[in-house]
Image (cartoon, rainbow, N blue to C red):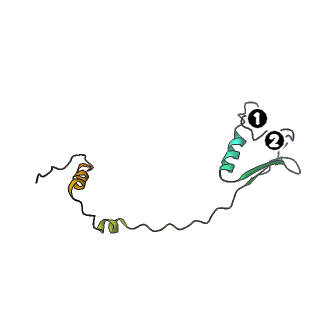
Amino acid sequence: ALDSGPGFDPALLDSVLDPFFTTKDGGTGLGLPIVSSIINSHGGEIQLANGPEGGALVRILLPAAEPEQPEAPEAPAAAAEAQPAPEESGEAAVRAADDRENGTPEPRKES
């Protein structure tokens, strides 16, 4: 992107990406550092320069995206429910009954 302003002061060009560095009254100096951080986190690079005929020139270089891989189709819920559940016996069956959604255990039968 190229703007039509005065461009970057060449003496300050190395500082404009530093957090809290600003040349504006009331500026926070966080805009370009935040942008730079986001670009870097995506494997990219930001380049700052002055345009050949004036103005600030900002180049943002990002790596090409990997082609999306199609997701494997999920088994329909009905097919998953149709599969027989493993047989439970003894303590495991009692524990499963104790963990029901409403929290009330089923009465146990004594043998």
In the foreground, 61 or 93: 93
Left or right, 86 with reference to 74: left
Q: Are marks 2 and 1 in contact (CB under 8 Å)?
A: no
Q: Position of residue 64 (x, y in %)?
A: 68, 61
Q: Is residue 78 above or below residue 32?
A: below
In this view of the protein, which residue sits in the foreground, 104 or 20? Answer: 104
CA gap, disc 2 and disc 1: 12 Å
x, y percentage for residue 60?
74, 53
Nearer to me, 37 or 35: 37
Q: Position of residue 85 (x, y in %)?
A: 28, 64
Q: Is residue 77 left or right of residue 108?
A: right
Q: Nearer the viewer, residue 22 or 71?
A: 71
Q: Which residue is mark 1?
A: 22
User: What SS does tag 1 mark?
Assistant: loop
Examine the image and state in which quarter residue 37 appears. top right
Image coordinates for residue 5, horizontal then vertical, percent: 83, 43
The image quarter in which residue 22 lies? top right
Query: Which tag, 2 or 1, sits closer to the chain's start?
Result: 2
Residue of label 2: 14
Residue 92 higher or lower than 66, as above or below: above
Compared with 12, 93 (above or below) is below
Residue 88 in the figure: left or right of residue 43: left
Callout 1: few (<14), some (14-19), or many (20+) C-alpha neighbours within 10 Å? some
